Image (cartoon, rainbow, N blue to C red):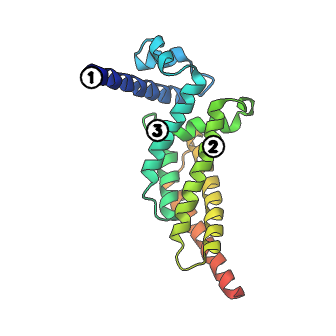
């Protein structure tokens, strides 16, 4: 039994090493530029070990995206409002997208490839990326909805949806800027974006109050 546990642990450690290797390689080279041989080299494991854990590159990237998404979810569980969301997603994630060590940030750099590469339409990793984007949107919208106190459920749901759309568009844009190496003060623009969206929320609520 002890031998079996040790074998299982060694297997899990090997799989984690492979995912961390493909994480750094994928940020540098993208999906097309990453090979299973590259992953074996970076991880320091035999290529047979890579294929033992992952039958092909598509499966490897699917599990990499799931790994990054789980890290992202854990780091965003405590988000309480729109300002905190933007501060993290623009200031932290965008600025950190140059770092190969942050799975939550690297997810966006990898995701950009799948977002723009339509020729990968049937690729399982691209399909998983798009599914994760939907899950992220619902995750954020549900937390924003809970932050709107003193309004009816339908108003809170509409505001949360609209702000989630706007927030995602803003953060996507800033992530492109980070990936392109733009000289941008992400923390400052995260605050400006929050100011703008909070002002929009106030205006929407005031207009609704005036109509009733």
Question: What's the CA distance linking mark 2 and mark 1?
Answer: 39 Å
Residue at left offset 41%, top offset 15%: 45
Residue occupying the point 65% across, 34% down: 126
Residue 12 position within the rendered picture, expressed as x and y whole percent measured from the top left? 38, 26
Query: Which corner quadrant of the image does residue 114 belong to?
Result: top right
Cα distance in 3D space between marks 2 and 3: 18 Å
Q: Position of residue 97 (x, y in %)?
A: 50, 40
Does label 2 or label 3 sit earlier along the sequence? 3
Residue placed most toward the observer, 92 or 37 = 37
> Which label sits on residue 131?
2
Mark 2 vs mark 1, foreground winner is 1
Give residue 1's mark.
1
Q: Earlier in the sequence, mark 1 or mark 3?
A: 1
Relative to 106, say whether 92 is above or below: below
**Mark 1–mark 3 distance (CA, rounded to whole Å):** 34 Å
Residue at 47% in and 11% down: 48
Mark 1, secondary structure of its residue? loop
């Amino acid at each position: 039994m002890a031998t079996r546990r040790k074998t299982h642990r060694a297997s899990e450690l090997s799989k984690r090493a492979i995912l961390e290797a493909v994480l750094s390689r994928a940020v540098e080279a993208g999906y097309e530029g990453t090979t299973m041989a590259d992953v074996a080299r970076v991880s320091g494991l035999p290529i047979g070990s890579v294929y033992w854990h992952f039958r092909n590159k598509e499966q490897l990237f699917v599990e990499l995206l799931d790994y990054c998404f789980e890290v992202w979810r854990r780091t965003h569980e405590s988000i309480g409002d729109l300002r905190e969301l933007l501060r993290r997603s623009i200031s932290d994630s965008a600025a950190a997208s140059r770092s190969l060590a942050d799975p939550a940030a690297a997810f966006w750099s990898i995701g950009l490839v799948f977002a723009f590469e339509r020729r990968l339409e049937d690729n399982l990793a691209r399909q998983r990326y798009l599914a994760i984007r939907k899950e992220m949107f619902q995750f954020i919208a549900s937390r924003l909805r809970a932050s709107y106190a003193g309004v009816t459920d339908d108003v809170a749901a509409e505001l949360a949806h609209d702000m989630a759309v706007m927030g995602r568009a803003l953060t996507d844009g800033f992530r492109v800027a980070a990936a392109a190496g733009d000289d941008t003060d992400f923390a400052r623009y995260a605050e400006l974006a929050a100011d703008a969206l909070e002002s929009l929320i106030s205006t929407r609520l005031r207009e609704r109050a005036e109509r009733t």
